Image (cartoon, rainbow, N blue to C red):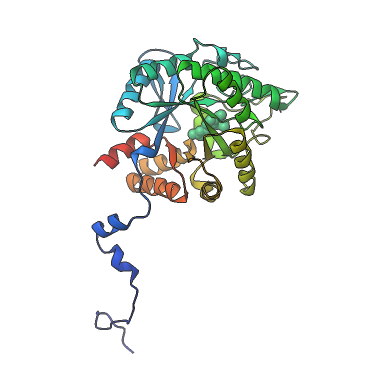
Amino acid sequence: MEMQTTQSVTLSLIERPRRLRRTEAIRRMVGETRLSVDQLVAPLFVVEGHGVRQEVPSMPGQYRLSIDELVREARELHALGIPAVALFPALDESLKTPDGREAFNPDGLYPRAIRAVKEAVPELLVITDVALDPYSSDGHDGIVRDGRILNDETVEILARMAVVQAQAGADIVAPSDMMDGRVGAIRRALDEAGFTEVAILSYTAKYASAFYGPFRDALDSAPRHRPGVPPDKKTYQMDPANAREALRELRLDLEEGADMVMVKPALPYLDVIYRVKQASDVPVAAYHVSGEYAMLKAAALNGWLDEKAAVLEALTAICRAGADVILTYFAKQVAQWLQK
Ligand code: PBG
């Protein structure tokens, strides 16, 4: 028998899903997920100095910025409609100690950066990172003793750290350390210091991921290779094999007073984002992390992927899985694309 090559045959179909894919206008009208600038948070790295714009080698297009450049960038992001930035400090090695005490210095780089951004662009939300790694000479999020990460001692330090950040003007503090009990301790410390209006965005399900490599390059914050220092963060960050455990972390964070919860990384953990969204009554954020950025950038720079299409698809998928808020190094580019 000969193959039919023309439309002379008509199947008798009641439903033809392709009818709603026929034109750009129809597709636009029936789209189930809408990526918006309103949900984007731009992570930014700050360093000492003036006029510094140092590209991170493993993150093309991302920079360590001195405070003046950081403020300039913050103004641009605000003008594009981005509601928030997440700041991370890259400290000089000489300021790093085992106890991370520089984290309490009210005149340190980080509080100065927070103040400068809030003074220049008050409406732009500043999200701060609560963890010891930028300040730790061991490269860990907590205090290391005898080859172990101390939980309760670390939590006490984190709570003080959050208060210093709130005093500098942080709108939202985001504990990224994964110690047990830190959300409750931070909430109590903030309230006692009078910061009842400062919100907590908890890194609820933060995995021990290989995708943080470029971020650790940016801050020079990887665990130090030396005897007595654990070589990785697996005793506090979650095992990538676990999803149900994320719901346990979620329950604890909500009980302890988290205002928003986060899953991190994003694209390899869409199932976790989905589960956390189903189980929580607070906004859910996802962190599209440095390694996810690096993969897409590297492929795009090689001409192997269409950058705009691939990035918008990735972020739409994160949104579709249930993320209300997305932290992404592509925030500025996406805001520009969405304007057109
Ligand atoms: C550390 C922290 C990390 C990131 C955010 N906060 C790295 C880590 O846990 O080692 C990673 C973000 C990224 O990769 O973009 N508290």
Residue 83: name its quadrant: top left
**Residue at x 73%, y 26% (from the top left corner):** 147
On the picture, is 187 further left or further right than 310? right
Residue 135 appears in the rendering: no
The spot of residue 98 in percent (x, y) is 65, 17
**Residue at x 58%, y 19% (from the top left corner):** 192
- Which is more toward the observer, 199 or 180? 199
- In the rendered image of this protein, does residue 204 appear above or below residue 129? below
The spot of residue 3 in percent (x, y) is 31, 83
- Which is more toward the observer, 204 or 328? 204
- In the rendered image of this protein, does residue 215 appear above or below residue 115? below
Residue 49: name its quadrant: top left
On the picture, is 156 further left or further right than 60? right
Q: Which quarter of the figure is the N terminus placed in? A: bottom left
Q: Which quarter of the figure is the C terminus placed in? A: top left
Extreme residue toward the top, this view: 107
Extreme residue toward the bottom, this view: 1
